[in-house]
């Protein structure tokens, strides 16, 4: 495909991705409402639609702006498959709920739902991190990881598509449930989990997932300059996944918000990294996250412990179990008083621990500013200034040009002297 043709196709695809995704989401919502299905997981549904909506928007931008980069096409494909899968299942549920029997299009929608999740997961956890940020493998050595993960995914998808029966369970216990024969299914091929080859396929998928994670670490360690900043954005967003063990024990609302936040943060970080828009602000973002994340955790601990301690003392003195308002007011005032001092201390600690070069440069400039007020020797001041520049900026060469004092001219004007170095 020529460059001009590829650019035209990319622009058309970029314009269509978001409208198609929105159409799929709206179709899903209207069909589920028309079928009268009770929505037992509204938070999860909203999280999926919003999160993959961010993938659709960023994918459209990348496809239009960077058509040769596979990252944009992968994100666009993920959003399109999600919208298609949900719309197909909703149509099948609507037809069964209103007519009693699925038609050919409903069967096709259920059939898509049997295998599309395998592609979505493989693209998300294997190929997106493996190809980031330029849409290419880190080197040819990583080709087996991509091939083995692809083989495992492809075989699982084919087996799922060829099951002898198709099933749809929508709307929970009071929703739509039915099983039909797969027109292209193989007789006796039931659940893929029961097949002897299932363990081997899972092993191939595990190789792909672990290899993709290792490739991110290797690429990050070897990256320099612009690529290092791109990897910082990706790792920063992906680090939210580490909260999964904690989020699983929290209420469903928090779990759904966290899932949407992971998708939105990941897609936004990928867009910034690939488009290189405000790329070098990642250091500031990480710094502020460390500072205010630590500050929030500490203040929350102070607040909870302050309220608990005050309540315990009040209960011991009065014998009442009711929590006094004084405990809440006191803890709030303590937090307000501790906010700025604690923030400064945390900022100083993080700068010393994680941003040592920046911290040393700042301390050097502060020392030089203090010395500048008392220095009167021009030569000593010149040496100090050159030393500060070398220490903080580390240039390959430093030159300092001083403007000389003007020499009076016979006509009353001033004749400049030659500058000296």
Image (cartoon, rainbow, N blue to C red):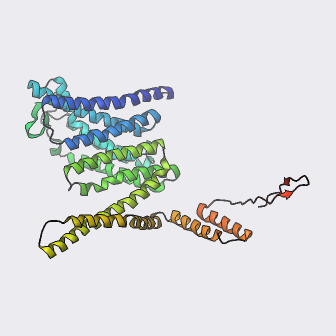
| Vertical arrangement, residue 297 with respect to residue 10, above or below | below
Q: Nearer the viewer, residue 345 or 92?
A: 345
Q: Position of residue 405 (x, y in %)?
A: 80, 60
Q: Residue furthest bottom?
A: 317
Q: How many marks?
A: 0
Q: Is residue 257 left or right of residue 351?
A: left
Q: Is residue 174 left or right of residue 222?
A: left
Q: Position of residue 236 (x, y in %)?
A: 39, 53
Q: Residue at x 28, y 50 (%)?
A: 258
Q: Position of residue 365 (x, y in %)?
A: 58, 65
Q: Residue at x 56, y 64 (%)?
A: 361
Q: Nearer the viewer, residue 166 or 386?
A: 386
| Vertical arrangement, residue 390 with respect to residue 6, above or below | below
- Whether residue 67 is visible here, answered yes or no, is no
Q: Nearer the viewer, residue 242 or 369?
A: 369
Q: Residue furthest right?
A: 410
Q: Residue at x 65, y 59 (%)?
A: 396
Q: Position of residue 130 (x, y in %)?
A: 39, 47
Q: What is the quadrant of the C terminus in the image?
A: bottom right
- Whether residue 302 is visible here, answered yes or no, is yes
Residue 272 in which image quadrant: top left
| Vertical arrangement, residue 32 with respect to residue 388, above or below | above
| Vertical arrangement, residue 38 with respect to residue 387, above or below | above
Residue 354 in which image quadrant: bottom left
Q: Residue at x 37, y 36 (%)?
A: 57
Q: Is residue 152 left or right of residue 271?
A: left
């Amino acid at each position: 495909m020529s460059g001009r043709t590829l650019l035209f196709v990319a622009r058309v695809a970029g314009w269509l991705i978001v409208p198609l995704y929105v159409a799929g989401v709206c179709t899903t919502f209207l069909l589920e409402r028309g079928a009268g299905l009770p929505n037992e997981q509204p938070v999860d549904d909203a999280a999926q639609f919003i999160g993959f909506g961010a993938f659709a928007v960023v994918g459209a931008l990348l496809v239009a702006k960077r058509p040769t980069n596979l990252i944009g096409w992968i994100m666009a494909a993920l959003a399109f498959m999600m919208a298609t899968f949900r719309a197909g299942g909703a149509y099948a549920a609507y037809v069964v709920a209103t007519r009693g029997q699925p038609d050919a299009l409903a069967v096709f929608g259920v059939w898509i739902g049997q295998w599309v999740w395998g592609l979505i997961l493989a693209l998300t956890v294997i190929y997106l991190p493996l190809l980031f940020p330029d849409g290419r493998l880190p080197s040819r050595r990583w080709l087996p990881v991509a091939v083995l993960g692809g083989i495992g995914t492809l075989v699982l998808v084919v087996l799922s598509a060829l099951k002898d029966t198709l099933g749809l369970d929508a709307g929970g216990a009071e929703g739509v449930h039915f099983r039909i024969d797969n027109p292209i299914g193989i007789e006796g091929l039931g659940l893929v989990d029961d097949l002897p080859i299932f363990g081997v396929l899972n092993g191939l998928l595990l190789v792909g997932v672990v290899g993709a994670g290792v490739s991110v670490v290797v690429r990050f360690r070897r990256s320099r300059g612009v690529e290092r900043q791109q990897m910082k954005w990706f790792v920063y967003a992906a680090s939210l996944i580490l909260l999964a063990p904690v989020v699983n024990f929290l209420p469903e609302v928090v779990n759904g918000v966290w899932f949407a936040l992971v998708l939105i943060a990941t897609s936004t970080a990928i867009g910034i990294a690939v488009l290189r828009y405000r790329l070098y602000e990642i250091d500031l973002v990480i710094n502020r996250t460390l500072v205010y994340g630590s500050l929030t955790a500490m203040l929350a601990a102070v607040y909870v412990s302050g309220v608990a301690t005050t309540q315990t003392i009040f209960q011991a003195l009065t014998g009442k179990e009711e929590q006094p308002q004084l405990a809440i007011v006191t803890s709030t005032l303590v937090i307000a008083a501790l906010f700025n001092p604690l923030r400064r201390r945390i900022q100083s600690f993080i700068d010393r621990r994680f941003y040592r070069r920046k911290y040393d440069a700042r301390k050097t400039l502060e020392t030089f500013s203090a010395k500048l007020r008392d220095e009167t020797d021009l030569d000593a001041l010149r040496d100090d200034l050159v030393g500060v520049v070398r220490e903080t900026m580390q240039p390959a060469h430093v030159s300092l040009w001083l403007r000389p004092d003007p020499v009076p001219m016979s006509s009353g004007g001033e004749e400049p002297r030659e500058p000296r170095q």
